[in-house]
Image: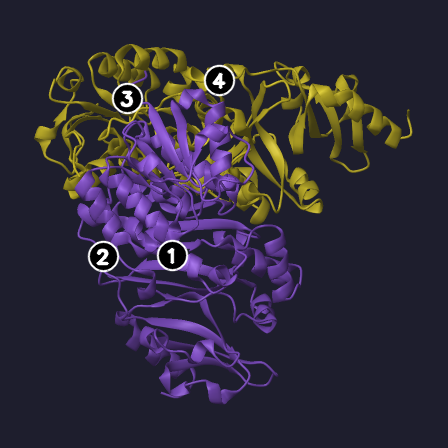
Chain colours: A purple, B yellow
Amino acid sequence: METHKQLTIGLFGFGVVGEGLYKVLKQTPSLKASIKKVCIKHPDKKRDAPASLFTTQKEDILQDPEINVVVEVIDDANAAFQIVSTALLNGKAVVSASKKMIAEHLPELLSLQQETGQSFLYESSACASIPVIRNLEEYYDNDLLHSIRAIVNGSTNFILTKMFEDKLDFQSALLLAQQLGFAESNPKLDVEGYDAVNKWTILLNHAYGIVSHPDEILFTGIQQVQLSDALVAKEKHWDIKLIAQAKKLNNGQVAAFVLPQFVKHDEPLSFVKNEYNGVVIESGFADKQFFYGKGAGSFPTASAVLSDIAALRYNYKYEYKKLYHHKPHDLTNDYYLKVYVSFDDWSYIPREEFEWIEEWHAEAERKYLIGVLHYSKLAGQNWWKENNTSLILTTDPIIDNLDIIKLKKKSLELAGIA
Amino acid sequence: METHKQLTIGLFGFGVVGEGLYKVLKQTPSLKASIKKVCIKHPDKKRDAPASLFTTQKEDILQDPEINVVVEVIDDANAAFQIVSTALLNGKAVVSASKKMIAEHLPELLSLQQETGQSFLYESSACASIPVIRNLEEYYDNDLLHSIRAIVNGSTNFILTKMFEDKLDFQSALLLAQQLGFAESNPKLDVEGYDAVNKWTILLNHAYGIVSHPDEILFTGIQQVQLSDALVAKEKHWDIKLIAQAKKLNNGQVAAFVLPQFVKHDEPLSFVKNEYNGVVIESGFADKQFFYGKGAGSFPTASAVLSDIAALRYNYKYEYKKLYHHKPHDLTNDYYLKVYVSFDDWSYIPREEFEWIEEWHAEAERKYLIGVLHYSKLAGQNWWKENNTSLILTTDPIIDNLDIIKLKKKSLELAGIA
C-alpha cells in the first residue's frame, strides 16, 4: 500500500518538544521520516543525541537539497518567520509550532504557500493535541459553521480552576501553574490573553477564511477577574472561563473576540478544567461537536507535530477552502454584547454608553451590573480594564444588530420604563 | 493551489443521508464532486431530484468508467458488500456508511484494498460526525495508545439518560427514542448491543490493528439494566453507560468488550447525554483526549460521508498502520473483570466462579454484589443475562493477570478471611 515519500527532516530547536520528537521518530521507522540535522542556538548544552546531528548554522538545513521537510519548534517568532519563509522558498515542506509567528504573518505565509505550492502545516499551534485545524479544514463547510467557541489557553484555565474550585488566590494559582510548567515564565502572554488571541487569529482563518491580525481582535485575559466575580457566578450556577468565540451574524459577517465569559454548568466548555483545552463547534450539518484535550506542554505539542509530519507523507496541504473556494467572511465591529461588569465605584462606569442595564447591584462592597453595549464601547476603550474593573461576558453574549431594537424595547418594558 | 481530481460520484441509496448529501454537493461546486447517478430500489417513490438521475440497475454505476467514486448509504449489509467489492475491483474509490457490513467483512475488505490499491473510507460508520477513525489513523501511534473508551450507540445512551435523569421506565424511554428517530424500528440492534459491537470491531482495527469479527467480542446491551441499579449508581455518584472499551494489558495484548459500566461523574463519558456519542483516548503522548458529538442521524452521518468525499480529492487512504506497519496487537481472553451484579435470587448467581466478592448486599428486595471474575466466566456464559440478572462493570473494571494474586490476597485480608 506504500506510495509515501521518504521524509528527510531538518529540525530547528531541541527543547522539550524537539527532543521528544527526535525520540519518537527514532522509535518509529515505519513513519519513513528521519531527522538529518538539528539546528540549535547553544552548541555547548549537553544533549542526549549524537553530536554530529547538531549544527548552529541554519543554512546547513535550509540549503541542503536532501532535506525535504523543515520542522520548526523554536521560541523566537522573528527567527521562526525567517526560517519558515526561506524553507518554503527553497522547496521544502514546513511544520511549525510558532503560533505568535503564524498569527502575525498570516498574509505573507498564505502568499508563500501559493507562490511555492509547498505544504505548511501547524496543527500544534492551536490547542496542541486537539486536531482542531485539521477538523475545521476537513469537516466543516463554510456556510454551515454557525459558531466556534473554545478554551485555547491552558494556563489561564488552570488558574481559573484553582481559584474557583480550590479557592486559591490569583498569585498562588499562577505560581502553581508556573511550577507545574503550564505557564510561561513571563506570565503576561498567557494571563493577559496574548497567547489566546494569537491562536484565535489562526483558527478564524481556518473556520471562516478571515485573514486578520491579533491587533484587530478584541481581547483581554483574566488579569481583572476577582473572587467576588466567582461568587456571583457560583450563585447563578455558572463558571468563569477565558473564551475565544466567533459567531456568524445574520448578515454573514463574523463577530470574534477573546474575553472572560460566564459558562453554564451543562455546557461542554464548563467540563474543561485545569490545563485542558476544549473546542465547541456548532454547524448546521454535524450539529454540536466538542473536542477536548491537553492544549499545551511538550508531549501534546510533539504529538501534533508528529501528526503533521505523518500527513506530509501523502503531501497533505491545508486548502484554506473558506478563503479560496468560498466567499470568505469579514470580521465585523457592528454588534452588541451583553456584559457583566464589577467595580469598586460607580464613577468608573460610563453608564451612558450602555444601551440598557438589566441588573444593577450596588448594595455590596463590590458592585456589579449586567447590561448591553455596542462593541465600539469596548474596542479601543480602556475603562473596563482600569480601576479594578472586571468585565465578563454573559452566557450568550452576542446580540445581532437586527435584534437590538426589539430587545431594548422589551427590556425597558420589563423594567417599567417604557 | 488546486491539483485535485474531479470526483464523479455514483450514489447507492437516497434515504435521508443520501438525499442530504445530494443537496449539499449541489450547493458546493468548489468540492469538485458531482453525483452522476443514484441507484435506488423503488423507482416509483417521489423524490426531490430529476428523474434522469435515478436508476434501479446497479451496473449503471458499477460499470460506468466515468464514475470514479461510489458512495454507498444503503441498509442491506449483503447488498452493500457486493456493491463495495465490485466497485473497488472496477477501480473506483468507495465511501461507505454500512457499519454492519464493514464489521462482518473486515478481512475481505482489507484484502480488496490491498489488491486494488483503491481508497475505501467509512468515517460515518462509527460515531458518525465524530472523526474518530481519521484521528486514530493520524494521531495515535500504536505503542502509545493505552486505552480507548467510548459511547458509540446514541439510542441506548438516550434511553439510559431518560431513565436515570427523567425517571422514565425502559419502555417509555425506548418509545420516545423511536419517536425522535434515534432508534431503529427493530430496537434489538441498538438495545442489545449489536450496533455498538459492530462499530467497536471497526474501531479496534484502527486503534490496535486487530482484525476481528463482532462474534469474537464480549458484548451485551442495556436490556438487563434496572432502575434499582440506577439507585445504587446514584448513591455512589456514578452514571450507568453502555461503554465500548479496549485496553492494552501489560503483556501487550488487548482486552476489549462492550458492556454496561458505571462511570464517575467527573469522567468525560459522564458528560455524554442523550443521543450524543463520546470517545476518550488515552495515549502516552497526547495524554487524554475526548471527542464528543452526534453519533447518529441523517445530518451527522452525511457530514462524515462528505468529509470522506473531500479527502478523496487528494487520494486519501487509510493506511491501517497499526496493522501493516507495526506488529498488530492480539485480542486476549485472559484477564479479570470487577463487576456489579444485581439479581432477585441468590440461586441464580454462580458464587463459586468469582475470585472474590468485595460487597454483598442481600438485605434489599433487589440484591447485588460486587466481585471479581475471569473473562471466561462471562464469555459464552448465560447466567448473567438470564433470570432478571443485571451485570454492570465497575468504574475501572479490567484487572491484569499479573495483578490478580496480589489483589486477591489484599482483598481477603481486608475481609478478615486470610
Respond whether the residues carrying marks 4 and 1 are from the same subunit.
no
Q: CA distance from mark 2 to mark 1?
A: 19 Å
Quarter that holds the C terminus of chain B:
top right
The chain to which mark 2 is attached is A
Residue B210's disc number:
4
Respond whether the residues carrying marks 1 and 3 are from the same subunit.
no
Mark 2 residue type? His
Q: Which residue is mark 2?
A: A329
- Tag 3 near tag 4, CB within 8 Å: no
Respond whether the residues carrying marks 3 and 4 are from the same subunit.
yes
Mark 3 residue type? Ser
Mark 1 residue type? Asn
Location of residue A194 in the rendering, given as x and y in whole percent from the top left corner = 42, 61
Q: Residue at x 66, y 33 (%)?
A: B396
Q: Is residue B115 visible?
A: yes
Location of residue A188 in the rendering, given as x and y in whole percent from the top left corner = 49, 63
